[in-house]
Image (spheres, rainbow, N blue to C red):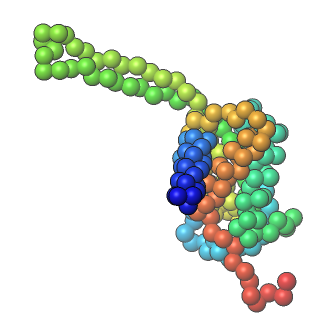
């Protein structure tokens, strides 16, 4: 009987934890594009910087968020096996922006009896802001973009500092999920 209670409690804890994780996740959609003529697995070193000549959103592109983005990219890239280097093989540049969007909804209220009761079409609009986090990866020796990943969607600002850093890190993990792991060079003397 104790075993059944213990198993039931374990299952309940896992269900609650899973529900909390889903509730806390951002509604961001990620995607990527890359240059198929470049072998992305050949690189081992990287560095990070904000994108050049780009006007960023004053809130998402603030110095605080730039630091969070840089730290998150470094942590994720190092987790993939890349080494931070002042003279890197690839350069990861990031940027953020916010776009005003409008969603139009149409609710048809037609029925087979509309000639008797009347009917109609309700149209409503909803204005919102869509945030984008964009990572551009350049091959350092040619300054040619070789990979681009982005996340876009409605971002609800987190309430605490830790939540902001976690949100940014999770976003960078999602964006870089498809970027290949660094391969170890077995022939190198390093």
Foreground residue among 34 and 82: 82
Q: Residue at x 76, y 65 (%)?
A: 78
x%, y% of residue 147? Answer: 62, 61
Taking the view exactly as shown, the residue that stands out farthest to the right is 86
* Residue 69 in view of the camera: yes
Question: Measuring 83% from the left and 39% from the top, which residue is drawn there?
Answer: 63
Residue at 19% x, 10% y is 118
Quarter occupied by residue 91: bottom right
Q: Is residue 176 left or right of residue 74?
A: left
Q: Quadrant of residue 149?
A: bottom right
Please give the name of the residue rendered at 62% of the width and 36% of the height, measured from the top-left corner.
155
Expressed as whole percent of the image width and height from the top left, the position of residue 48 reads 78, 56
Work out whether residue 84 or residue 9 is closer to the camera in this orientation and state it.
Answer: 9
Is residue 49 visible to us here? no
Q: Is residue 28 above or below residue 35?
A: above
Pinpoint residue 150: horizontal percent, then vertical percent.
60, 50
Quarter of the figure that contains the C terminus: bottom right
Q: Looking at the image, which is closer to me, 97 or 126?
A: 126
- Image quadrant of residue 103? top left
Query: What is the count of numbered marks?
Result: 0
Q: Please give left or right for residue 73 compared with residue 28 in the image.
A: right
Horizontal placement of 174 versus 62: left or right? left
| Percent position of residue 171, x then y | 65, 49
Residue 179 located left or right of residue 114: right
């Amino acid at each position: 009987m104790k075993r059944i209670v213990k198993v039931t409690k374990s299952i309940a804890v896992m269900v609650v934890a899973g529900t909390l994780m889903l509730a806390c996740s951002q509604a961001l959609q990620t995607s990527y594009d890359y240059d198929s003529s470049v072998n992305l697995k050949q690189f081992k070193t990287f560095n990070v910087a904000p994108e050049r000549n780009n006007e960023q959103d004053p809130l998402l592109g603030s110095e605080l968020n730039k630091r969070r983005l840089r730290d998150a990219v470094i942590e994720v890239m190092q987790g993939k096996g890349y080494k931070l280097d002042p003279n890197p093989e690839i350069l990861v540049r990031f940027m953020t922006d916010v776009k005003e969007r409008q969603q139009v909804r149409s609710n048809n209220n037609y029925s087979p009896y509309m000639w008797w009761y009347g009917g109609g079409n309700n149209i409503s609009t909803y204005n919102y802001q869509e945030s984008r986090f964009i990572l551009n990866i350049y091959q350092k020796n040619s300054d040619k973009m070789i990979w681009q990943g982005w996340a876009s969607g409605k971002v609800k600002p987190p309430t605490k500092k830790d939540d902001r850093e976690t949100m940014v890190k999770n976003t960078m993990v999602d964006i870089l999920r498809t970027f290949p792991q660094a391969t170890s060079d077995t022939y190198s003397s390093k």
